[in-house]
Image: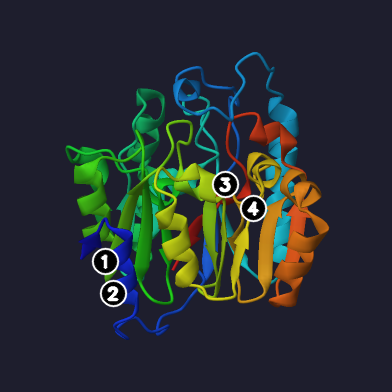
Amino acid sequence: MIVTEADRFLEEMGSGDYHAEFPATAKAVMMIEPAGFTISSQSATDNHYMDVTQVANEARAVAQSRALADLIRQQGIEVVVFPGDAETPDAIFPNNVFATTHQNLIIGHMLHPVRQKEAEREDIRQYFKSSGYQTVDLSIENCIAELTGALIIDHARNIGFCGMSGRVNEAGLAAMHEAFGLKMMFAFDLQANEYHTNVVMMILAGRACVIYPEAFMNPVVPQAISHAFPERTLILSEAEKNAFAGNCIALSDSDLFMSSTGFAALRPQSRQTLESWGFQIHHTALDEIEKAGGSLRCMVAEIF
């Protein structure tokens, strides 16, 4: 079901029907190396974390991407890396375009034409097909659905949280709910200056949440989400959010990854809180890639 009211969401959560019965984290991740790395003026029209006056350094972006892949592998997590394509310079953020369930490869429908071409990659499609995944192709549907940029998933309880912006429409909301096979999706409006939910909140290994409440149109929404993670919700400051601390991801029950920009912005209390919940924070420099308006979580597509 899709719910749009905080009271209805809380009623459902209080029903006792949503148990942590599924794997909370992915078995591997997918990355795409930068190629033709630029700061897209088209994407910048609604991504206010970008600055088109900055100059992109492709070699530095490649080095930072490879360092991230190495850091993830060092924690015993498999990383599948696909080559970049100069015709799709934003492909370094594949989680908007590709996602998986245990059965399906889901291909998103991007808002901007500069990113729609990414969905056509036959090598990625064939890789997952040969691994036994069925393809659910939303890129050919009449919708906008930027997958786990717009949609945050509590995989353990099979619940989705979707912030509505220009990067997802009502048709895309319904299509993602079905494609991911979610038990419930809570949909809500983001502030006009926010483009993706994964910059302003994240669910960590199904047992904690980080969130920036001011990013939500209705202040009751983040309060309701916090109730879903009692005593395990970290409220981010504006500085932490702007530094991409919320664009993090837990790739195991204890391994939490964020950029060095985000890590440096964490207040001591925020860092201590995450560590007290049993998370070891791993970070690496991604400042070159962050010029393009996304950070670490955007760079990894989960493989379940």
Q: Along the horizontal axis of the image, is 50 left or right of 104?
A: right
Which three-letter amino acid code belongs to the residue tagged 3? Met
Q: Which mark is residue 8?
A: 1
Whole-number angstrom distance, CA of label 4 to CA of label 2: 26 Å
Position of 136 relative to 19 (above/below): above
> At which x and y percent is residue 302?
49, 60
Circle 4 sits in a helix, a strand or a loop, which is it?
A: loop
Q: Are discs 4 and 2 less than 8 Å apart at CB? A: no
How dense is the environment of label 4, judged by Cα within 10 Å: few (below 14), some, or many (20 and up)? many
Q: Nearer the viewer, residue 37 or 80?
A: 37
Which three-letter amino acid code belongs to the residue tagged 4? Leu
Q: Which residue is mark 3?
A: 299
Q: Is residue 101 visible?
A: no
Circle 3 sits in a helix, a strand or a loop, which is it?
A: helix
Q: Nearer the viewer, residue 51 or 7?
A: 7
Q: Which residue is mark 2?
A: 12
Circle 1 sits in a helix, a strand or a loop, which is it?
A: helix
Q: Is residue 276 visible?
A: yes
Which residue occupies 68% across, 70% down? 255
Q: Earlier in the sequence, mark 4 or mark 2?
A: 2
